[in-house]
Amino acid sequence: MRKLAAGNWKMNGTAATLAEIEALNARYDAAPVDILICPPATLLSRAADSAGTAIAIGGQDCHPAHSGAHTGDIASDMLKDAGATYVILGHSERRTDHNETDATVRVKTVAALNTGLIPIVCVGETEAERDADQTLDVIRTQLGGSLPDGLDGGDFVVAYEPVWAIGTGRVPTHDQITEVHDLMRAELTARFGDSATETRLLYGGSVKPGNAAEIFALSNVDGALVGGASLKADDFAGIIDALAGA
Ligand code: PGA
């Protein structure tokens, strides 16, 4: 499978920030791994223009409906129209800020797939859940509830992002990452059969150029979903290069 370095700009970036995508485009002519930037929706079409062929563009959320009276929301079809090929769904910030449940994420995943976008479905435990030894149950439940039935493993991506590791500089131990990624592969295989070997499993949460290589060396880690370090081309390139060398 092609590994994936995905950048999530969150609510950061204006026209000036597109220079970071241009720098990545100039640097990766023939990309060694799949490279994705998910800018805020206001920048999508300009980001797609800046990205060239080596870099894919994605949304950070979509509405489950394809159009209609939903003020402020964005349909998967609109993301595609603006040049997106991926969409992040169920990020913990959406689950918290917008009360998104697994059922919400599941209907959005269906919409994205019907539009022809590749969904990146996010799961992850809170610090309280980890402390209470509930991590594996939480991941099992979120993964089960956020994905619709009948998928082919190659059609979607899963990101494991422990909530307590996002934007904090704290990273789980290697054993903790491996335990969850191995569990996710087993759960997906039980549900979707052998095609689950094709599902890219990303780790996310404080991935930096300095810790990327050791994370990418772990079993069942097929890339990263990167927040802060994706905002600067040089930092993100350090992560891309680590992934290419893994
Ligand atoms: P971070 O964010 O890399 O800034 O920790 C990761 C994410 O939320 O996707």
Image (cartoon, rainbow, N blue to C red):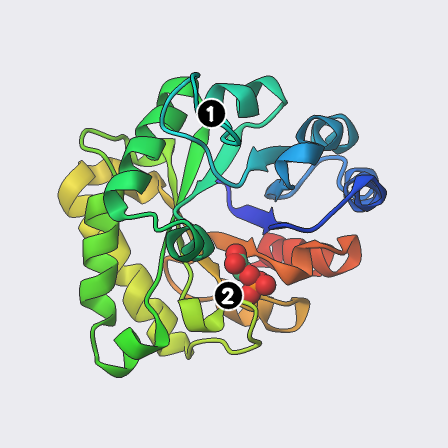
Per the image, label 2 sits on a secondary structure element best described as loop
| Amino acid residing under circle 1 | Ser
Instruction: Name the mark nearer the viewer: 1 or 2.
Output: 1
The amino acid pointed to by label 2 is Gly
- Element type where label 1 sits in the image: helix
Measure the C-alpha gap from mark 1 to mark 2. 25 Å
Identify the residue at the far left of this view. 190
Callout 2: 10 Å neighbours few (<14), some, many (20+)? many
Identify whether 212 is placed above or below 77. below
Q: Position of residue 200 (x, y in %)?
A: 41, 45
> Dot 1: few (<14), some (14–19), or many (≥20) neighbours within 10 Å?
many
- Pick the residue in front: 25 or 10: 10
Say which of 225 and 228 sits in front: 228
Residue occupying the point 67% across, 67% down: 209
When asked about the image quadrant of residue 56, the answer is top right
**Location of mark 2 (residue):** 205
Q: In this view, does 225 lie to the left or right of 100?
A: right
Q: Can residue 2 be seen in this view?
A: yes
The quadrant of the picture occupied by the N terminus is: top left
Task: Kindly give the residue lying farthest to the bottom in the view shown.
Answer: 131
* Residue 98 located left or right of residue 72: left
Snapshot quadrant of residue 146 = top left
Ligand 1, seen in the image, is in the quarter at: bottom right
Residue 76: x and y, percent?
47, 25
Q: Is mark 2 within 8 Å of ligand 1?
A: yes
Mark carried by residue 143: none
**Horizontal and vertical percent position of residue 4:** 53, 46
The numbered dot on residue 76 is: 1
Of callouts 1 and 2, the N-terminal one = 1
Q: Check contact, mark 1 vs mark 2: CB within 8 A.
A: no
Tell me if 208 is positioned left or right of 218 in this view.
Answer: right
